[in-house]
């Protein structure tokens, strides 16, 4: 594990070097923003709406005290989505979707000797292959998470529309009550860190593949597992640092 961590640091030092050709980097960045971010909006949107609805229903069923205002449902949904659900759970889902894709893509290039060809041509493979993915995720993931927050709260509002558990007015009042802008900042800081972890760990796993197709599949699995573990670990660390 210590050896792999050292290899990861050395690879990241290569990755963060200034791109040799800015035009190539920016073109690749736009491609990665579309592939890693825009193409993930569908699954993120669907999950966000339904999870927002689930949190709202569960909260309403646990309010058995008539002295508690129903507006607390909207407040609970908003806080749950902003503080934890959208930045952390969505990042875990992106680790599975995006991380496996990055690891398998770069791993396939490694076993087919395309990365070796780049090195022979004097091109920095880390900067050429991994840096655009990291930059794209750091740029687009906060946008995705903001959309996820909105859709999650929209899902809670749909429960008010299609059920009689609480009214739309109560829900919207709760969503708008006791809001602190710092919670958004906290969520976006976590999102940026998680985006770096997902793309860099997945890129590292794919970059160091040795063997064939079976090893590429194993690297994809490791990328998802280690990205998820690091997200949970840094979620604890960042929560302690930013909210304590």
Image (cartoon, rainbow, N blue to C red):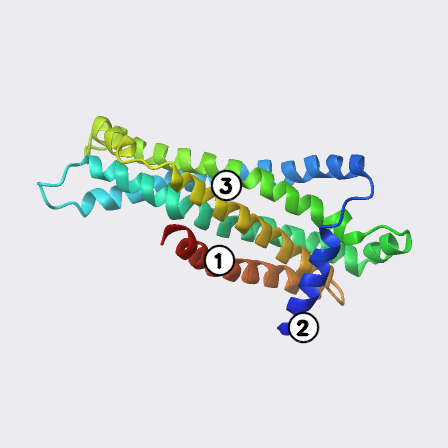
Quickly name the residue at label 3.
43
Q: Position of residue 195 (x, y in %)?
A: 56, 48
User: Residue shown at 50%/49% (left/top)?
Assistant: 91
Q: In the rendered image of this protein, does residue 47 appear above or below residue 7?
A: above
Looking at the image, tell me whether mark 2 or mark 3 is earlier in sequence order: 2
User: Residue shown at 75%/50% (left/top)?
Assistant: 17
Quickly name the residue at label 2.
3
Rendered image: mark on residue 97: none
Is residue 59 in sight in this rendering? Answer: yes
Looking at the image, tell me whether mark 1 or mark 3 is earlier in sequence order: 3
Splitting the image into 4 quarters, where does residue 30 fall? top right
Quickly name the residue at label 1.
234
Looking at the image, tell me whether mark 1 or mark 2 is earlier in sequence order: 2
User: Residue shown at 64%/41% (left/top)?
Assistant: 136
SS type, badge 2: helix
Counting other residues with Cα less than 10 Å from the Cα at mark 2, is it few (<14), some (14-19), or many (20 or more)?
few
SS type, badge 3: helix
Front position in the image: 43 or 205: 205
Marks 1/3: CA–CA distance? 24 Å
């Amino acid at each position: 594990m210590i050896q792999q961590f050292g290899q990861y640091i050395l690879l990241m030092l290569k990755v963060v070097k200034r791109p040799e050709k800015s035009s190539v980097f920016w073109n690749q960045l736009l491609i990665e923003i579309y592939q890693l971010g825009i193409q993930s909006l569908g699954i993120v949107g669907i999950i966000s709406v339904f999870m927002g609805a689930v949190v709202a229903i569960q909260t309403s069923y646990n309010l058995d005290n008539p002295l508690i205002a129903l507006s607390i449902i909207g407040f609970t949904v908003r806080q749950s989505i902003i503080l934890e659900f959208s930045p952390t759970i969505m990042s875990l889902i992106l680790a599975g979707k995006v991380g496996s894709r990055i690891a398998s893509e770069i791993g396939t290039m490694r076993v087919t000797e395309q990365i070796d060809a780049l090195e022979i041509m004097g091109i920095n493979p880390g900067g050429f292959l991994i840096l655009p993915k990291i930059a794209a995720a750091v740029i687009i993931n906060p946008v995705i998470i903001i959309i996820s927050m909105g859709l999650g709260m929209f899902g809670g509002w749909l429960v008010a529309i299609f059920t009689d558990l609480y009214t739309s007015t109560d829900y919207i009042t709760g969503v708008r009550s006791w809001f602190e802008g710092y919670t958004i900042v906290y969520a976006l800081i976590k999102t940026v860190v998680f985006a770096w972890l997902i793309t860099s760990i997945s890129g590292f796993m794919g970059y160091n593949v040795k063997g064939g197709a079976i090893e590429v599949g194993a690297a994809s699995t490791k990328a998802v597992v280690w990205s998820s573990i690091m997200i949970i670990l840094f979620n604890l660390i960042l929560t302690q640092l930013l909210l304590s």
